[in-house]
Amino acid sequence: MTMTNKLGKKLSVTGKTRDMIVSFFDNLFDRKFSDAEKELENIKGRKFPDEEYQQGYLNALEGLLLSVRSGDERDFYNRLSMSGKTYDEYIKSFKEFRKLPVRTQFDQGYFSAWMDVIQYRVNLETN
């Protein structure tokens, strides 16, 4: 299994899109923001099962890019506790939130992206 496959394990996206998401996260957390932006533009060109879902997913990635770039301690990502137990709790919370009946496809995509970034961090720490 390649490193990209290991880091992409259990993400909500598959195939080439998953590889692009992993590349986006790699660049983002290595603080290679221009490379992350380029990969985000490539992701925008991919087909998702639902357009509204895609908008939510991309909105979360764009917000994450801004948050990591700014380092603002008020942003959710910058306040995350980075431990394995906490990661599992975040993933569980996002999954439960996605299951609530009032959620739109946009919300589903948005929280799927957040689950993916947390899962990526779990995968990164366990490899």
Image: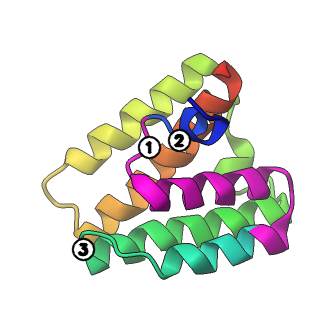
Q: Give the residue type at disc 3.
A: Asp
Q: Is residue 30 inside the magenta stretch?
A: yes
Horizontal and vertical percent position of residue 119: 52, 36
Q: Vertical placement of 9 versus 78: above or below? A: above
Q: Mark 3 or mark 2: name the one nearer the start of the chain.
A: 2
Write down the residue under mark 2. Answer: 8
Side of 38 relative to 22 (left or right): right
Distance between mark 2 and mark 1 Cα atoms? 6 Å
**In this rendering, is residue 124 above or below 61?**
above
Where does the image place residue 8, in percent across and percent down from the top left?
53, 41
Residue 52 falls in which quadrant of the image?
bottom left
Which residue is located at x 20 percent, y 46 percent?
99
Q: Amino acid at mark 1?
A: Leu
In the image, the segment drawn in magenta is 10-35
Judge by depth and name the residue closer to the eye, 78 or 3: 3
Instruction: Give the image's coloring scheme.
Output: rainbow
> Which residue is at the front of the view, 104 or 52?
52
Q: Are marks 1 and 3 in contact (CB under 8 Å)?
A: no
Q: Is residue 27 above or below residue 115?
A: below
Magenta stretch: dominant SS? Answer: helix
Who comes first in sequence, dot 1 or dot 3?
A: 1
The extreme left residue here reads 101
Residue at 49% from the left image edge and 24% from the top image edge: 88
Tell me: residue 73, above or below residue 47: above
User: Tag count in the figure?
Assistant: 3
Residue hosting label 1 = 11
